[in-house]
Image (tube, rainbow, N blue to C red):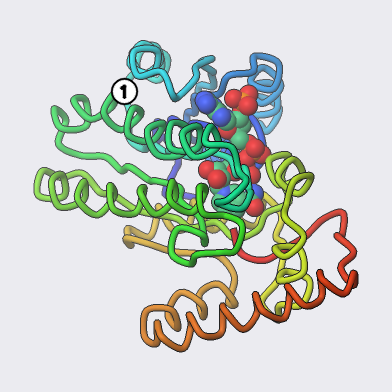
Amino acid sequence: MQWFAGKKVFITGGSKGIGRAAALQLARSGASVVVAARGAEALDETVAAMKAAGGAGTFGRVSVDVTDAAAVEAAAAEALELLGGIDVLICNAGYAWPGLVEDAPLESFEAMMRTNYLGHVHTVRAFLPRFLEQGHGHINLVSSVIGFLPVYGYAAYSASKFAIVGFAGALDLEVKPRGIQVSLFYPPTTDTPGLAKENEIKPPVAWAIEHDSAFSATYTPEQVADHLLRHIASGRYQATHGFPNQLIYHFNRLAPGIARWMNHDEVAKAMKKVAAGKVHAPSRGGGPK
Ligand SMILES: NC(=O)c1ccc[n+]([C@@H]2O[C@H](COP(=O)([O-])OP(=O)(O)OC[C@H]3O[C@@H](n4cnc5c(N)ncnc54)[C@H](OP(=O)(O)O)[C@@H]3O)[C@@H](O)[C@H]2O)c1
């Protein structure tokens, strides 16, 4: 992607899944990339893969937990040093821990707010002084389809992803007049290590909804990362991937009452199936995330 040639990019959650696929594509496009995550092994493997991808950029990694604001500040300083500046920040680290409100541990509500929402806040705040000083740059925040569409069994995750949307909107108002572009991306269900873990504990009704939904589709990390990067390069504010999700996004906004009724109808049918013992959780796949 020509737009990224020579750009300096920092990606949280860049060692696996969508973030890793984006890092590799950026490397091929001639960008310099620093990936951030907690696990050193996957980070090293991603840096090696970026080098093998053959771009002309500089590649590096920082090991950091995005829930720790002070550690993120230190990581940002290290990344600015490695890259020699910053053009594009992609806040992508996050995960889903599904469960019903009545029996999900309180820890899941707190933990996802800390990683999914506050992780983005910490990362943005760590790089913002540099962006404002230079008066240009792009900040992309990764939410989820569940950041605009509530889904059964995902209350805690949904809240953390809706929070990102509110944060992005206000951030955009503050920094756009000062030359900084903000964008939002809502990934769909994507076949990543994160999805595999989430599927292990997905509630049966959520499985049944996905199984029966005409809108259910699972995409590869490469497809989703490609759209994420094209979206950033386009300069537009928000995007989701896949025609069904685009349709759901617009329908949900234009006819929220009908969308809610349809959502309830799907849940009611799924509950009947589960009660009748007709649900066999597939090993992969699913509806919007
Ligand atoms: N896959 C989907 O179906 C889907 C759908 C909608 C939205 N999304 C969103 O898209 C983003 C990427 O998802 P994915 O499926 O590609 O995830 P993934 O395969 O689980 O990879 C997550 C990445 O984030 C890092 N990470 C997780 N917690 C972190 C923390 N506290 N601090 C620093 N790094 C952390 C992980 O590395 P370490 O574990 O080593 O730290 C890894 O590099 C997430 O925000 C997710 O919510 C995914």
Q: Quadrant of residue 55?
A: top right
| Residue 235 locus on image (x, y percent) | 32, 58
Residue in front for this viewpoint, 119 or 152: 152
Residue in front for this viewpoint, 115 or 156: 156
Residue drawn at point x = 43 percent, y = 31 percent: 114
Q: Secondary structure at mark 1?
A: loop
Answer left or right for 233 relative to 156: left
| Residue 144 locus on image (x, y percent) | 50, 55
Q: Quadrant of residue 78?
A: top left
Answer left or right for 176 relative to 236: left
The amino acid at mark 1 is Gly
**Image-quarter location of ligand 1:** top right
Residue drawn at point x = 73 percent, y = 65 percent: 205
Instruction: Please say if 110 is above or below 40.
Output: below
| Residue 179 locus on image (x, y percent) | 15, 45
Question: Disc count in the image?
Answer: 1
Instruction: Please say if 186 is above or below 193.
Output: below
Residue in front for this viewpoint, 288 or 238: 288
Residue in front for this viewpoint, 259 or 196: 259
Residue drawn at point x = 45 percent, y = 58 percent: 147
Answer left or right for 288 relative to 273: left
Residue position marked by numbered label 1 in the rendering: 85
Q: Residue lying furthest left in this view?
A: 177
